[in-house]
Amino acid sequence: MLEALWSVEFKSSFGLGGCGVAVFETGRVFGGDSTMIYVGSFKVENGVIYSDIKVKKYANVAGMVSVVGINDFTLRITGTPAQNEMLLSGYVVEDPSRKITIKAVRRAELP
């Protein structure tokens, strides 16, 4: 059900936002944006998606900063899985006061 290419729009508790893409495939998550890569895993249990995603800066782009204010961190995300659009929320494992919300929209099926 979740295996697809998704666009992701995110906003942190600092009021910073951004967007990127993520592929959900066989329990794994791969994605990125103009400065960060995302690699992690997901599972669905009892109607809830759980995901831990390692986020790491790969490029120095002038004016671009991480929406949570750090460049190498793990996100712990939960939400309700859906076919076309999901609203997810979570926090930075290394500093749980840094929170994030994510809107994911299904964009393409995997080949």
Image (cartoon, grey):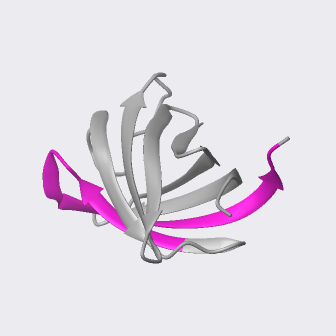
Q: Specify the segment rendered in magenta.
A: 87-110
Quarter holding residue 2: bottom right
Is residue 101 at all visible to an observer of this figure? no
Q: Looking at the image, which residue is at 49% across and 32% down?
A: 37
Check the image and report above or below for 111 versus 98. above
In which quadrant will I find the N terminus?
A: bottom right
Is residue 53 at all visible to an observer of this figure? yes
In which quadrant will I find the C terminus?
A: top right
Q: Relative to residue 70, is residue 101 drawn left or right?
A: right
Q: Looking at the image, which residue is at 55% across and 72% down?
A: 81
The residue closer to the viewer here, 33 or 93, is: 93
Does residue 1 belong to the magenta stretch? no
Quarter holding residue 43: bottom left
Q: Relative to residue 99, is residue 82 drawn left or right?
A: right
Where in the figure is residue 101, as x and y percent of width and height? 41, 68
The overriding secondary structure of the stretch rendered in magenta is strand
The residue closer to the viewer here, 1 or 73, is: 1
Check the image and report above or below for 77 versus 75. below
Q: Relative to residue 18, is residue 106 drawn left or right?
A: right
Where in the figure is residue 32, as x and y percent of width and height? 56, 38
Q: Looking at the image, which residue is at 50% across and 27% down?
A: 61
Q: Looking at the image, which residue is at 56% across and 61% down?
A: 9
Q: Residue furthest front?
A: 46
Where in the figure is residue 46, as x and y percent of width and height? 42, 76
Where in the figure is residue 28, as x and y percent of width and height? 52, 41
Does residue 88 belong to the magenta stretch? yes
